Amino acid sequence: MAHPTFRRTFLEIVVSSLLVTASLGGRPLLAQPSSLREAAADHFLIGLGVSDSISEMEECHGLLQQQFQIVTPENCMKPAGLRPTADRWDFDLPDRFVEFAVANQLQVVGHCLIWAKDDRTPPWFYQDGDGLASRELILQRVRDHVTTIVSRYRGRITQWDVVNEALDDGPNQLRDSGWSRATDYEFIAEAFRAAHEEDPQALLIYNDYNNEAPAKRERMIALLKKLLADQVPIHAVGLQGHYEIDAIPYENIDATIQAIRDLGLRVVVSELDIDMIPRGRWWADGGKYREEMAMLDPYANGCPEDLLRRQAEQYAKLFAIYKKHAEAIERVSFWNLHDGQSWLNYFPWNRVNYPLLFDRQLQPKPAYHAVLQVLSGRSKPSDIP
Ligand code: GLA
């Protein structure tokens, strides 16, 4: 069942059922949906992560409003942006972001209250004078941070990434960080409790990457079970979905969504993109390929048609999985609006990349049409690669 705040509005249901515009000889005639949000109206919200300064990017506003329903600010609500020191809150950008979204009838995902990584957490969070803060002080800071932000945006931010990336990539359950060293898993529980107390209507999400990989999934499911057993108010799990072309783990994604559903939790796909110049090798074998990879920019003058076609097929296959699980999926968000805005043009090295559904001229790519087809039911499962 949909989280109460996020049930589709009556209007959206009417509009989507109007897509079946007429009946000819008993055969329904489907009108072509003109946007992702329209095509997905019976399934889930369609969103995206966008620049903190989106309000000033007028050239993007038309496409944004036409295609999407919910936006996530790319950086300005992260602890490093919002709270660089204990007594400094930088609400200017987040306030402008939320005002812009509300004025444009877009929902907002708050991202992220706690980012459980030392290099993403301003050091003051862990300190007390010259020493380390105690467990109690850290938990008090979690509560204070979460409470201040969630109460400020109550009713305007409808979904929160409460904790980002707390799971270990190695054998431990939790990533080693100032948070986990001081409190074990309590910082996670405390963050969710504080957020729920401030806004009981908001959808509260645990968000991570590679969490469909079997070993990490297992650690995540164990963590979720513990949170649920402790009656922590967690509602959904975010699969970031930063994939690489020709290496999308479809079966693992399907199995992970099912495993989350089995716990009675909802799913969001929070940061979807498909890297066309795969980056995985950057971290292999102690980083020894980095020099060579840093020279790699194969599509600087354009992306080959064949690659765009493969990307379209792969996006279609992903959306077929999402559609199959639509009852449990709250939202699918891409990470950035068009290829020119993607972080994958810079991370982990500079290259001209093409990870999204819209190109640098804001025109729909083959992947856009493929996703639209799957969402609007025009592809039979057997057409999907
Ligand atoms: C992670 C974070 C996002 C963003 C992306 C890359 O997935 O959750 O906020 O930083 O990395 O841009």
Image (spheres, rainbow, N blue to C red):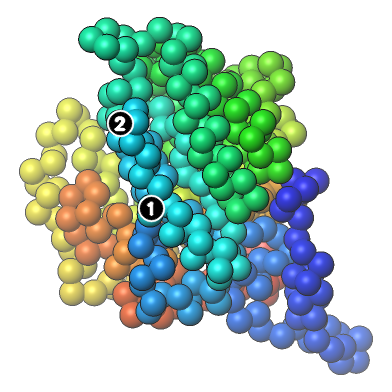
Q: Residue at x 65, y 50 (%)?
A: 155
Q: Residue at x 22, y 54 (%)?
A: 346
- Answer yes or no: do the residues labelled 1 and 2 have beta carbons within 8 Å? no
Residue nearest the viewer, comparing 19 with 75: 75
* Tally of numbered tags: 2
Spatial CA distance of label 1 from label 2 is 15 Å
Query: Which picture quadrant has residue 281?
Result: top left
Q: Secondary structure at mark 2?
A: loop
Residue nearest the viewer, comparing 61 with 41: 61
Q: Secondary structure at mark 1?
A: helix
Residue indicated by mark 1: 92
Q: Residue at x 74, y 34 (%)?
A: 264
Label 1 crowd (10 A; few <14 / some 14-19 / many >=20):
few
Picture quarter with the C terminus:
bottom right
Residue indicated by mark 2: 85
**In the shown orientation, is residue 383 left or right of residue 249?**
right
Tag shown at residue 73: none
Residue 251 in the image, given as x and y percentages of width and height = 56, 43
Q: Residue at x 75, y 61 (%)?
A: 8
Q: Earlier in the sequence, mark 1 or mark 2?
A: 2
Q: Is 194 situated above or below 111?
A: above
Q: Of the residues shown, which amino acid type is indicated by label 2? A: Thr
Query: Which picture quadrant has residue 52?
Result: bottom left
Residue 185 in the image, given as x and y percentages of width and height = 51, 16
Q: Is 245 situated above or below 252?
A: below
User: Is residue 319 at all visible to an observer of this figure?
Assistant: no
